[in-house]
Image: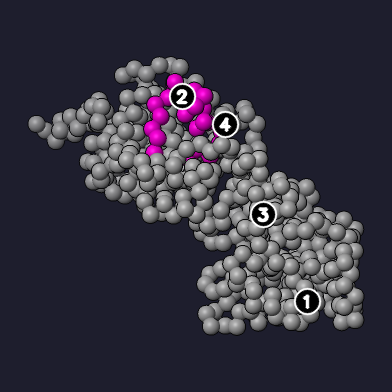
């Protein structure tokens, strides 16, 4: 048998055998898929609609990439369209997986050219390709439905990654393509993967409201489930359950791969944060309010201590500190807060007391006659709408951003404010555990924590609270008209402090 005949025979096997996609993965990538991944590959090959409802770390995005490479290989002149919850997620998730697995296959490297937004056949790039598609959350339903439009071929595959928060209109074009029917000469398929974060949208429809149309593969990291994914660490799963409880919405989503009692929603979108950064305010819109400092204390390592000033609707550029091991952390922080208080004229200073690292700095300030306020994130909130203090200050801070608050141009705020999610447990707001946020973000949300601490108490008029009057009287004799005034000495047209001139607090 000739070499070409052997190739043709292998292609026919990969395409027609029920386990052809599994064998394709073994042949091209020299890996053995997990049982759940095998089930998904068989389902993709047999059914027009396959959905993977998955906990964290089960390899669903990897499986979507395998399906894409299989489809591109066995269906000549096929069109594949892929999308995800955000353009960044598509780039860093599924599109990256496509590159990773192509690099493991000499055949795929020869046959296809990988680009940032398009993968094309070397032989017929105009008609044989896979395209990355993105959509805007602010787009209307019609615009969203056009995300996957533009595929005109006998063989079509739609892939939707991170579908847990995907709006329903995204699916419209893909579903329309299936109406042409699936025959050997006309194949249309949809592959969906996601964490079950929302009780509406694409993944929920696939798994619940329209489950009769879909082949659903459940992937779980539950340490007590014999069918659990071997990719998920049993110890990690048990740690999450112990820390947050089996009924925690984040444990249900990330460990069990189950829908929570209520949807997990992001607090803020990128547009909300950018609008707050670009917002212009007049002085009389915020000068009536108390000046406050929020202090998020780090000890050593990569995390930063952040001192964030706010007055009413206006937040100013923060001061940041890093602490080399062996440095006098408490003394340094206390001294820097005193300097910030003097320059900014703050009436209230709030310290995160959750980890105990701020205790030394607070003690020094108390000894100096100051009255810093401790904010214990895990403590029950006095406002019964919130599960704890952390939920209270984050929700209050979020509402401030949405309702006219002015943010300074701090790049870190965009990622920090748009990463955490919230849910409702027992009718109360609950914010995603900080450890999980830090894991996804790659660092602690120090800047936002510091700013949102200033919402621990409701805003009040300047020097009108008993504590504010006491501090104002004490500080009045210390201030001179030469001290920095952020309202009159701003160094740029936006009115923000200029860090190059040491005009931060």
Circle 3 or circle 4, nearest the eye:
3
Residue 448, compared with residue 149, is above or below; it is below
**Residue that label 4 marks:** 200
**Residue that label 3 marks:** 380
Circle 1 or circle 4, nearest the eye:
1
Numbered disc 1: secondary structure: loop
Tell me the number on the disc at residue 370: 1
Numbered disc 2: secondary structure: helix
Neighbor class of circle 4 (other Cα within 10 Å; few <14, some 14-19, many 20+) is some
Q: Nearer the viewer, residue 399 or 468?
A: 468
**Residue that label 2 marks:** 211
- The quadrant the N terminus occupies is top left
Q: CA distance from mark 2 to mark 3?
A: 40 Å
Measured from the top left, where is residue 150 in percent x and y? 50, 28
Q: Nearer the viewer, residue 464 or 187?
A: 464
Which residue appears at 36% of the width and 24% of the height?
Answer: 47
In the rendered structure, does residue 300 fall within the stretch colored magenta? no
Which residue appears at 80% of the width and 56% of the height?
Answer: 458
Range of the magenta residues? 194-219
Measured from the top left, where is residue 164 in percent x and y? 52, 37
Q: CA distance from mark 1 to mark 4?
A: 50 Å
Q: CA distance from mark 3 to mark 4?
A: 30 Å
């Amino acid at each position: 048998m000739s070499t070409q005949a052997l190739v043709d025979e292998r292609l026919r096997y990969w395409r027609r055998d029920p386990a052809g996609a599994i064998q394709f993965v073994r042949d091209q990538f020299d890996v053995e898929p997990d049982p759940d991944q095998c089930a998904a590959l068989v389902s993709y090959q047999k059914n027009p609609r396959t959905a993977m409802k998955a906990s964290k770390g089960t390899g669903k995005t990897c499986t979507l990439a395998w399906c894409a490479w299989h489809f591109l290989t066995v269906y000549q002149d096929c069109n594949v369209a892929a999308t995800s919850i955000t353009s960044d997620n598509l780039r860093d998730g599924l599109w990256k997986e496509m590159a990773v697995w192509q690099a493991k296959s000499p055949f795929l490297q020869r046959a296809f050219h990988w680009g940032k937004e398009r993968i094309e056949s070397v032989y017929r790039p105009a008609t044989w390709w896979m395209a990355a598609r993105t959509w805007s959350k602010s787009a209307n339903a019609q615009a969203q439905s056009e995300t996957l439009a533009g595929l005109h071929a006998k063989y079509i595959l739609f892939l939707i990654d991170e579908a847990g928060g995907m709006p329903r209109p995204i699916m419209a074009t893909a579903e329309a393509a299936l109406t042409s029917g699936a025959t050997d000469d006309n194949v249309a398929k949809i592959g969906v993967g996601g964490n079950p974060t929302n009780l509406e949208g694409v993944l929920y429809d696939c798994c619940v409201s329209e489950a009769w149309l879909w082949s659903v593969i459940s992937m779980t990291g539950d340490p007590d489930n014999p069918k659990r994914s071997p990719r998920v660490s049993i110890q990690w799963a048990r740690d999450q359950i112990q820390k947050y409880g089996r009924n925690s919405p984040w444990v249900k989503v990330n460990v069990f791969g189950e829908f929570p009692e209520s949807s997990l929603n992001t607090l803020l979108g990128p547009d909300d944060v950018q609008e707050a950064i670009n917002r212009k305010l007049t002085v009389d819109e915020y000068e009536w309010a108390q000046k406050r400092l929020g202090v998020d204390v780090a000890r050593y390592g990569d995390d930063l201590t952040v001192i964030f000033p706010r007055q009413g609707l206006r937040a100013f550029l923060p001061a940041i500190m890093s602490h080399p091991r062996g440095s006098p952390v408490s003394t340094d922080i206390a001294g820097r807060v005193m300097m910030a208080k003097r320059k900014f004229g703050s009436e209230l200073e709030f310290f995160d007391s959750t980890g105990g690292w701020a205790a030394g700095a607070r003690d020094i300030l108390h000894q100096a006659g100051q009255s810093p306020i401790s904010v214990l994130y895990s403590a029950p909130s006095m406002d019964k709408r919130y599960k704890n203090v952390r939920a209270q200050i984050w929700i209050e801070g979020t509402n401030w951003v949405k309702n006219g608050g002015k943010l300074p141009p701090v790049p870190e705020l965009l990622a920090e404010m748009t990463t955490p999610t919230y849910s409702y447990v027992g009718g109360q707001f609950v914010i995603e555990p900080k450890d999980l946020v830090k894991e996804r973000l790659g660092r602690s949300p120090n800047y936002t924590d510091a700013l949102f601490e200033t919402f621990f108490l409701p805003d009040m008029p300047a020097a009108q609270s008993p504590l504010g009057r006491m501090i104002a009287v004490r500080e009045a004799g210390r201030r001179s008209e030469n001290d920095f005034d952020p309202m009159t000495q701003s160094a740029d047209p936006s009115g923000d402090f200029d860090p190059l001139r040491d005009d931060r607090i």
